[in-house]
Image (cartoon, rainbow, N blue to C red):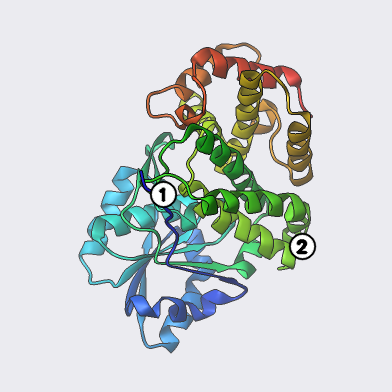
């Protein structure tokens, strides 16, 4: 099997980029449709239209209804096909961007992603998550192409709630540990091949930047300022994590979080928060399998989580686990046939997953 590496065709990051948006997408054509929810439209409409208007070109908005579901993708694709657009711009959070990517894939149009927070690594990936209309995970769908352009305006991201940046750090922190697991198991990545040295190195750099700049970046975003630390964490959360995971693969961290969305329909945590929690479960499973606890790695992870405010126990996710019933449901959902958990480099059973969940619960980590 060949090694493979997929990346966005172009990536731009910096302050106030949206006011000159057309400059960065002009090679794709003249007329674009922007998929976003109402709040994001209010946030970016004036500056984006300014950039397009000054170039004498057009952009229109389509309202995203909030869930990256097959029904929403079909609805938007039908509307897009009625017009002659040069490309699709997805603006907002991960589900809006994934929906735009799926619509572009369906309609055969190039896609531009414009994240308004650094809460996830969707902007750079050639995959998209599909959910039911009530928010339960269905599957991760591979796309024909990576985004044509990723446009990251750090002024907008620095003004978003700090919790979004922290959630993005949680998702990005998982990238290295899942890439490491996938390397050991030798599974196929999301681009149809085996991982390159480049892909794993990107996740290692992502991990290092998080540990070095994560705490300061959160403080700077709380102060609504763009700094070197913010720029570094935005790059880690969006580019390094996105390109790293799609060219390496996902493992137990995603398997556990996706299972929680299935087993606990009322789960109200952000995606990156749940993925970060999944890292703890994955590490426990690895240590159990190896027969020894990596105290240095474990304590480094907990220290980072405390510094930036990532969940370390079920209560941090709003989950009450007095008995074992919920843990058993999560373990069962984590072991469904299509789960990422089977990318781990050892045999997976419901019993092993349940045991790791129970160990984490009993640790009572503050």
Residue appearing at x 51%, y 25% in the figure: 264
Viewer-nearest of discs 2 and 1: 1
Residue appearing at x 60%, y 47% in the figure: 172
Residue 211 spot, x, y in % from top left: 74, 49
Q: Secondary structure at mark 1?
A: loop
259 to 84, vertically: above or below: above
Residue at label 2? Answer: 223
Q: Residue furthest left?
A: 82
Mark drawn on residue 3: 1
Quadrant for the N terminus in the image: top left
The answer to whether 278 appears left or right of 359 in the picture is left
The answer to whether 321 appears left or right of 64 in the picture is right
Task: Work out whether residue 187 can be spotted.
Answer: yes
Q: Quadrant of residue 274?
A: top right
Distance between the alpha carbons at the discs numbered 2 and 1: 43 Å
Task: Work out whether residue 319 can be spotted.
Answer: no
254 to 328, vertically: above or below: below
Labels 2 and 1: the sequence-earlier one: 1
Residue 189 spot, x, y in % from top left: 42, 43
């Amino acid at each position: 099997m060949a090694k493979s590496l997929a990346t966005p065709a172009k990536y731009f990051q910096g302050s106030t980029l949206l006011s000159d948006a057309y400059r960065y997408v002009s090679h794709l054509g003249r007329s674009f449709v922007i998929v976003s929810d109402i709040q994001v439209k209010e946030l970016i409409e004036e500056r984006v239209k300014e950039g397009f208007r000054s170039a004498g070109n057009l952009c229109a908005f389509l309202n995203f209804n909030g869930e990256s579901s097959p029904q929403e993708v079909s609805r938007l694709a039908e509307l897009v096909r009625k017009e002659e657009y040069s490309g699709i711009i997805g603006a907002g959070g991960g589900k809006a961007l994934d929906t735009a990517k799926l619509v572009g894939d369906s309609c055969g149009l190039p896609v531009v992603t414009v994240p308004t927070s650094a809460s996830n690594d969707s902007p750079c990936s050639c995959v998209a998550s599909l959910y039911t209309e009530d928010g339960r995970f269905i599957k991760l769908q591979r796309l024909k192409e990576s985004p044509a352009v990723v446009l990251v305006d750090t002024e907008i991201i620095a003004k978003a709630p700090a919790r979004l940046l922290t959630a993005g750090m949680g998702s990005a922190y998982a990238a290295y540990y899942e890439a490491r697991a996938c390397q050991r198991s030798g599974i196929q990545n999301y681009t149809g091949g085996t991982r390159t040295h480049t892909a794993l190195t990107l996740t290692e750099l992502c991990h290092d930047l998080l540990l070095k700049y994560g705490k300061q970046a959160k403080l700077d975003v709380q102060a609504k300022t763009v700094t070197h630390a913010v720029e570094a964490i935005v790059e880690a959360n969006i580019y390094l994590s996105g390109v790293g995971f799609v060219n390496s693969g996902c493992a137990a961290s995603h398997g556990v979080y996706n299972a929680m969305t299935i087993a606990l329909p009322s789960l109200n945590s952000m995606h990156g928060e749940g993925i970060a929690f999944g890292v703890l479960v994955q590490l426990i499973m690895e240590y159990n399998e190896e027969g020894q606890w990596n105290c240095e790695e474990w304590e480094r992870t907990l220290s980072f989580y405390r510094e930036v405010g990532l969940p370390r126990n079920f209560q941090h996710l709003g989950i009450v686990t007095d008995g074992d019933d919920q843990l058993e449901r999560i373990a069962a959902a984590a072991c469904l046939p299509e789960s990422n958990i089977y990318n781990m480099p050892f045999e997976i059973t419901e019993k092993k997953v349940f045991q790791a969940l129970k160990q984490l619960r009993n640790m009572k980590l503050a």
